[in-house]
Image (cartoon, rainbow, N blue to C red):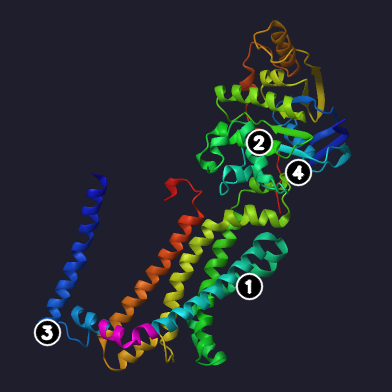
Amino acid sequence: MSVYARGLRRAYGNDVVLDGLDLDLATGEFVALLGASGSGKTTLLRTLAGLDLPDRGELRVPPRSAVVFQEPRLLPWKRVVDNVALGLDRRDARERAQAALAEVGLTDRAGAWPVTLSGGQAQRAALARALVREPALLLLDEPFAALDALTRLRMHGLVEQLWHRHRPATLLVTHDVDEALLLADRVLVLERGRIAFERSVELARPRDRAHPSFAALRTQLLGALGVSTEEPFEDALRCREAEPQPLATV
Amino acid sequence: MDTVSSGVRSLRRWYSPIVIIALWQAGSMLGLIPVRIIASPSAVLASFWTLLVSGQLLGNLGVSLARVVVGVAIGVAIGAGLAILAGLSRRGEAVVDPPLQMLRTLPLLGLTPLLILWFGIGELPKILLIVLATTFPVYLTLLGGIRAVDPKLIEAGRILGLSRWGIVRHVIVPGALPSALVGLRYALGTAWVTLVVGEQINADKGLGYLIMDARDFLRTDVIVVCLLVYAILGLGTDALVRGVERRALAWRPAVAR
């Protein structure tokens, strides 16, 4: 077992964001977390990352975890390879960073400044920075949401490939039902601070959106999210998370 | 094409200064501008040469430069140290910020009589004036820069396993550097102005002394030479910091320059 959480509760003032949440992630399992804005997705991810402490509950996470956020969060004053190597406390940090960049297809941008990268390239660099740490738990907080549709498709392929090779337990927070169904072994829907719906996805990889069983799962999931397939789902959920995020202090 | 036209344009910028200097020279030669008011450009040039050859100019310039270097070094160290203290801890801020904000509003040059009473008329009060002149701009801009560092980057640093010191070194200091360098440029500018005033009070060496000495002998040519040297030194140190900026801030988008 990679992640074990029981009865997690987190409130900001009177606003209960996580309300007795239970969650298990098996080693190497890919889980997608869906939910409307304000359902507590981001809080849950930040809790698993150790950025936010639950008020109550039991939580066990692997010692090594890595996060990729919606924004790449590269340090603009460090070249791409130095961003990837940042915080790696080992002699061959730079070589490992180069290798990670090669894995995401960014070898030729290793010496570039982050401002010169495209959105997709920056997010690939962020992915390399997460993977170079060999995390047992990989947390992805809507990492593709700011990318254009084509880049997003290519990132899906890349993430699946990297996950296959390194096998970290992965939690993907997303708004996109198709994205969840393309990548995850199991899809969870978060509602009012708890897992309200759970469905394992037993489709062969790589998955085909046009496949009838994919479509059936999509309908089922949209139903669980309270959206009928007639109305545009993306619009209903695309608005940003409105959860309070405590400012980081050093 | 572009370089040619910009070359012509920069040439054109010289026309009016040259005309003004020519008029000044003509006025002096015709006796319209008395030497007592200001010496002619040619006299200024001549005495510049005399002062240079006699070693008087370089000797006094060296003294002035040394005062600025020492004063700025101490002022930057204090300002940066206090800014880091106030920027990184709430308690540090509570201790450091209020007195600095109060001191900052004191008219700096008005402190000169007090400094003379306390420390006499030697090097110490002159250097202290420069220290005070540089501490505040460096403190304010560096503190502002530290505050402006994106908390999301700090959070990313934490997730990547950076220690507190690692976050200061890799995230906060480089993030605050652009505004700190602006502060340094400003500090150097004030340092020179302060020095001019400081050296005109009871100095026996330095450019300011040279000016005061020249005043006693109505040598307006020497005064102008010294003022020009001050100006060149100010421009020189500014160019130096801008050079550092270009190197240290190479990561910024080209549009910023």
**Predominant SS along the magenta part:** helix
Position of the C terminus of chain A by quadrant? bottom right
For the point 58% across and 42% down, the residue is A80
Three-letter amino acid code at the position of disc 2: Ala
**Residue, disc 2:** A100
Q: In front: B228, or B27?
A: B228
For the point 69% across and 23% down, the residue is A160
* Chain letter for mark 4: A
**Residue, disc 1:** B99
**Residue, disc 4:** A51
Task: Say few, some or many: other residues with alpha carbon within 10 Å of mark 2 (under 14 / 14 to 19 / 20 or more).
Answer: many
User: Are the residues under marks 4 and 2 on the same chain?
Assistant: yes
* Chain letter for mark 2: A
* Chain letter for mark 1: B
Left or right: residue A133 versus residue B137 is right
- SS category of the residue bearing label 2: helix
Residue A6 lies, with reference to residue A78, above or below; the image says above
Three-letter amino acid code at the position of disc 4: Leu
Q: Quadrant of residue A94?
A: top right
Disc with the residue nearer the chain's start (4 vs 2)? 4
Q: CA distance from mark 3 to mark 2?
A: 79 Å
Left or right: residue A38 versus residue B59 is right
Left or right: residue A35 versus residue A76 is right
Q: Quadrant of residue B199?
A: bottom left
- SS category of the residue bearing label 1: helix
Which of the two marks, 4 or 1, is nearer to us in this view?
A: 4
Q: In front: A92, or B147?
A: A92
Task: Say few, some or many: other residues with alpha carbon within 10 Å of mark 3 (under 14 / 14 to 19 / 20 or more).
Answer: few
Question: What segment is highlighted magenta in the picture?
Answer: B49-59
For the point 36% across and 76% down, the residue is B230
